[in-house]
Image: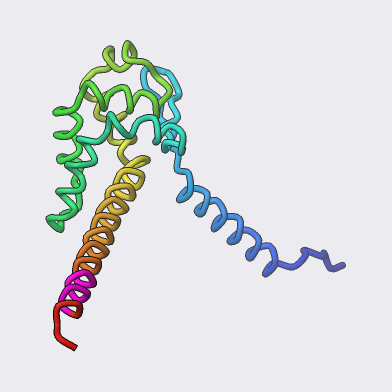
Amino acid sequence: MAKKIGNVHAAKLAAREAGELANELEVLHPERLITVRGRDITLREYGFVEWVRMRPALQPVLDAICATLEASEVPTYEMVLELISVHADTMLPVVGQSAGVDMDFLSSLTGDEGDELLTTWWSVNARFFIRRAFHRIAMGRAEREAEEHAKKKVMESVTAASSPA
């Protein structure tokens, strides 16, 4: 007697689509789960309101990332560690916010535990920072181009007005 097993192709297609959907969600809002000192910590990308509130404090960090990108470099993890070190008073609470931990917890970490947390934090939030830096660079270029265009139009108007008809 034959056993009906269903449509294998449809099952494979559904599984692939489910995987693609999970991957799209990962891109849209990445999260990583790590265990530090027996505590499960979910590191997540920042939301819109968080970003708006953090933006003034993070300006020097974004300036540095923009300078790196404008020099045609992709920030390496070592560059990020340098930024975190230089701006530790600003960055460590931001890292803690992503991880849902306080400064006391961060202060208690060993070097290896801190490295694991920072590496995971950057893997989750690198796109967040890079995207904002690229946006700022693109907007700056667009503003400069608009200003140059406006100056050119003014000069054309002045030249046309001063030329005898």
Start and end of the magenta stretch?
152-159
Closest to the observer: 59 or 108? 59
The correct choice, above or below, for 58 with respect to 146 in the image is above
| Picture quadrant of residue 163 | bottom left
Q: Residue at x 48, y 49 (%)?
A: 28
Q: Residue at x 27, y 33 (%)?
A: 58
Q: Quadrant of the N terminus?
A: bottom right
Q: Quadrant of the C terminus?
A: bottom left
Please state if 32 lies on the left or on the right of 3 as rendered.
left
Q: Position of residue 78 (x, y in %)?
A: 15, 39
Q: Residue at x 35, y 30 (%)?
A: 54
Please state if 99 lies on the left or on the right of 140 as rendered.
right
Q: Position of residue 9 (x, y in %)?
A: 67, 69
Q: Position of residue 53 (x, y in %)?
A: 39, 30
Q: Position of residue 41 (x, y in %)?
A: 43, 25
Closest to the observer: 139 or 153? 153
The correct choice, above or below, for 110 with respect to 163 in the image is above
The extreme front residue here reads 165
Count numbered badges in the picture: 0
The correct choice, above or below, for 149 with respect to 79 in the image is below
Q: Is residue 77 magenta?
A: no
| Picture quadrant of residue 147 | bottom left
